[in-house]
Structures are given as structure tokens and as C-alpha cells.
Image (cartoon, rainbow, N blue to C red):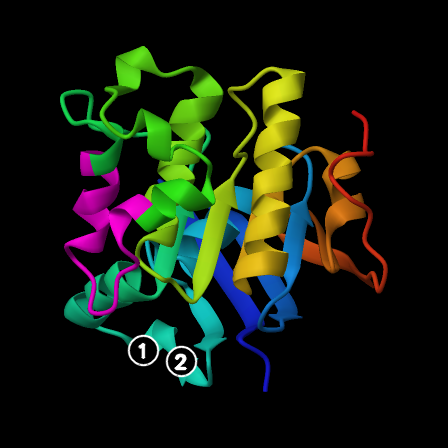
Amino acid sequence: MALVEFKDVKKIYKMGEVEVAAAAGFNFKIEEGELVVIVGPSGSGKTTLLNMLGGMDTVTSGTILIDGTDITKFNEAQLTDYRRFDIGFVFQFYNLVQNLTALENVELASQICDDPMPAIEALKNVSLQDRKDNFPSQLSGGEQQRVAIARALAKNPKLLLCDEPTGALDYKTGKAILKLLEQTCTEQKKTVVIITHNSAFARIANRVIKIREGLVVDVVLNDNPESADIIEW
């Protein structure tokens, strides 16, 4: 059984008399332990897909199965628990609390979970244990993103969802973050989903889901993904 399955998932927004289909019928699966890249141009429905998968937005119709459970049937309290315990989020902008240290930012996440990873261990996983007492303003953009990844990992989530995680970073730093996400999948056995408009990222993925105009237009399985070290964009 797949860890994630979307079955004809639609999201329709109404703007007065006009209906806009942000998701026109998504169909795909994700297996546990995969690094998945969901790629498509601006306006293709990537963020809508991520928000529905992460329980931050509801569907208009269709089914989303997580470990065999239909989360589209969840009430608000169940969705809150799903986001709290099962999902780790990494965004383009780091969303760190500025008056808390790196360690305290990670501890925020570990304090709300049933089975958290120790905050210092999460920072070690992103090679930032030596910066644990620094505030976000004392960290570079790449370091702040690594703290954000550590915060997400501290929850021990079923799914790590990353929305354009290198979008605010320069090329070299972005490549380091991509390598870290790759290692998170292979070494920590996490299922990692990266949303991006950058098709070059597809080369590191086990599964590439290409979307356009609210539909999945292709799914490519890759038995031999390349290392983030060697890809260029």
C-alpha cells in the first residue's frame, strides 16, 4: 500500500460567478521512503497540491489517502492532529521566531509531538549543533533554512513537505540544502516531497510528478537518481 494516494482530487475556487480549478483532478501515488519532486510552472497547482497534502486546505472532491486513511474525511481537530504529528513543513521563507535561538526554534516543534527527536539531535542532523545558541539574525540564509529543516525533522514526521526550499537562496547554498534533503531521505529514511518549478531537481528524485493546469501530466520513476552534488541549474 502506498504511503500517499491522490484519487481524482479537485479544488475549485469561486470568484463571484467564475470558478477556477486550482486542482482539476490529481491522481498519483507516493511510496514510503521516496524522495519525490513535484514540478510544474507557476500557476500549475503545485502549492494547492501541497496545501491539500499537508492538511492546510480542504478538497472540493476526491480522496487523499495517507497510510490508508482518508484525510479528506477529517474534521478540524483531526486535521490539526494530522499537521501536528504526521507532517513536517519546510517553506521558501524560513518562518523562524526571531527572538528564539536555533535550539529553541527546534524545541518549539519537539514540544508538540508524541515521539519527538531531541532538538540537539535534529540540529546535529543538519550540522548546526555548534550554532545552537545563535539567533536567526546571526545566521546566514542557508543556516536559517537548515534550522527550519531541523525543526521539521524534530517532529519525526511521516512526510517532510518542502515548498520551493531553495527559492530564497543563492545557487551554492541552495545546492547544499538540496543535498541535505537528499540525505534526509536516504540516511534517515524519511519520505521527502519537494515542490519546485526547477526541472533540474527532478534528477535527484526517486519519483517525479509533473503537473500542468491542475493535472498530473506525467509520472517518472527513477531507479538511479543522481546526487545533488553533480546537478546544475
In the figure, is residue 112 to the left or right of 46? left
Q: Quadrant of the N terminus?
A: bottom right
- Residue 185 % position (x, y): 59, 57
Q: Secondary structure at mark 1?
A: helix
Q: Residue furthest front?
A: 130
- Residue 222 % position (x, y): 83, 61
Residue at figure coordinates x 61%, y 63% from the top left? 26
Q: Amino acid at mark 1?
A: Lys
- The verdict on residue 111 being magenta is yes
- Residue 221 % position (x, y): 81, 64
Q: Give neighbour class at mark 1: few <14, some 14-19, many 20+ (Cα, 10 Å).
A: few
In this view, the residue in front, 121 or 22, is: 121
- Residue 70 % position (x, y): 40, 80
Q: Quadrant of the C terminus?
A: top right
Task: Say if mark 1 contacts mark 2, CB within 8 Å.
Answer: yes
Residue 160 visible in the shown view:
yes
Residue at figure coordinates x 55%, y 52% from the top left? 184
* Quadrant position of residue 83: bottom left
Q: Give neighbour class at mark 2: few <14, some 14-19, many 20+ (Cα, 10 Å).
A: some
**Residue 214 position (above or below residue 66):** above
Residue at figure coordinates x 52%, y 48% from the top left? 22
**Residue 139 position (above or below residue 33):** above
Which stretch is magenta? 104-120
* Quadrant position of residue 148: top left
In this view, the residue in front, 118 or 7, is: 118
Q: Which mark is residue 73?
A: 1
Residue at figure coordinates x 23%, y 36% from the top left? 103
Residue bearing the label numbered 2 = 70
